[in-house]
Image (cartoon, rainbow, N blue to C red):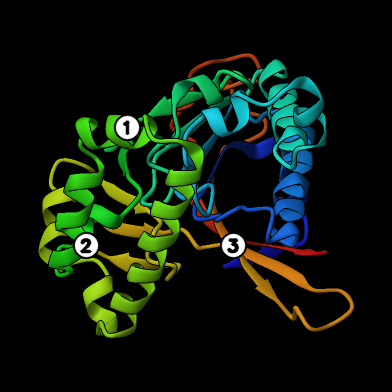
Amino acid sequence: MQSFNHLITTRPHQVRQVLISDLHLSPQEPALVQAFLALLDDCLALPALKRLFILGDWFEVWLGDDTYLSLSEDEKIAHWLTPLITKLKQLRINGCEILVMHGNRDFLLGQPFCNMFGGELIYEPYALAVGAQNYRLEHGDALCTDDKKYQFFRKIMRNRLTQWYLLNKSLEKRLAIADNMRKKSQQNNANKAAHIMDVNDKAVRQAIATSDALLHGHTHRPDIHQATNDKKRYVLGDWRLLDQDTRQPKVSAVIGAVTGDEHSNDGLNSNDLSSNDAKFELFEFTMLV
């Protein structure tokens, strides 16, 4: 796996699509926010980039779009999300689609917030054509079927009635509920075997049955697995703060990219991103903060 301090700067004209997940952004982790802004700067400099996918857990917690949309204009100017929105909006103006998927921490994210930067909320499973192959994209938590308690919790939280109930609570009550759920989750996970929180092989085989490859995040275990004899499972990485006790900490993440021949007919203005020369790869993206 190749590692870059900037996003694939050795082949900028070949990058067509970028896929990331599990950023877990929050005001409590400014280094991760800065790393995402740096990635967006790189995306803005990629002349052939047509899509940016954020496959869940973009935020550490998301309590509803109104946490930002209800702010006054002065409050928005000072808010930590505003620089992200500004850069994403410019990326969209440049012609890059921004596709956002729910994760297990930001399932209350809505289309109104995505409208702030021209993004689109997508749902799993999402089919992506890469060359002649069909990739299945999802966040990945639905594949962890050995964790029965979590799957029950997930079913409840993804129910529209539950979400309506939560979003009609005051922001203060939502904060309290989220804090309580986070504490319980940490306690439960501390007592679980590591394999229980990873994907289940049977669930993977079922998910990949009608696709050529599977791509997900969630597990924080970036790697490439041979899911079946002829199909691969790609796992994106979480964004990690390394060397945080030093004067210049580093953020690391394993991201995905669809690349193509820079001299192909796929062109900068083409909406056809499934040309035969397209190829998917994982890369390690690192940034000194």
Q: Measured from the top left, where is residue 153 in percent x and y?
A: 20, 55
Q: Is residue 179 left or right of residue 209?
A: right
Q: Check disc 2 and report its element: helix, strand or loop.
A: helix
Q: Is residue 110 above or below residue 183?
A: above
Judging by the rendered image, the residue that carries numbered circle 1 is 123
Q: How would you rate the neighbour count of disc 2 (Cα within 10 Å): few for under 14, some for 14-19, many for 20 or more? A: some
Question: On the image, numbered disc 3 is attached to which residue?
Answer: 239
- Measure the alpha-carbon separation of dots 2 and 3: 22 Å
- From where the camera sits, is residue 46 visible? no
Residue 161 placement: quadrant? top left
Relative side of 151 to 31, left or right: left
Q: Nearer the viewer, residue 131 or 139?
A: 139
**Residue placed at 55% from the left, 56% from the top?**
24
What's the residue at 72%, 19% (across, down)?
94
Spot occupied by residue 253 in the image (x, y as percentages of width and height): 60, 62
- How packed mark 1 is, by other alpha carbons closer than 10 Å (few <14, some 14-19, many 20 or more), is some
**Residue 227: horizontal and vertical position, in percent?**
23, 63
Residue 217, percent from left and from top: 40, 56
Amino acid of disc 3: Trp
Q: Secondary structure at mark 1?
A: loop
Residue shown at 37%/53% (left/top)?
216
Q: Please state, as top left, top right, bottom left or bottom right, where the C terminus lies in the image.
A: bottom right
Q: Is residue 286 visible?
A: yes
> Which numbered disc, 2 or 1, marks the residue that appears first in the sequence?
1
On residue 150, the disc is: 2
The local crowd at label 3, few if under 14, some if 14 to 19, many if 20 or more residues have their Cα within 10 Å, is many
Q: Amino acid at mark 2?
A: Tyr
Earlier in the chain: of badge 2 and badge 3, it is 2
Which of pointers 1 and 3 lies earlier in the amino acid sequence? 1
Please determine whether, in this image, residue 72 is positioned above or below residue 160.
above
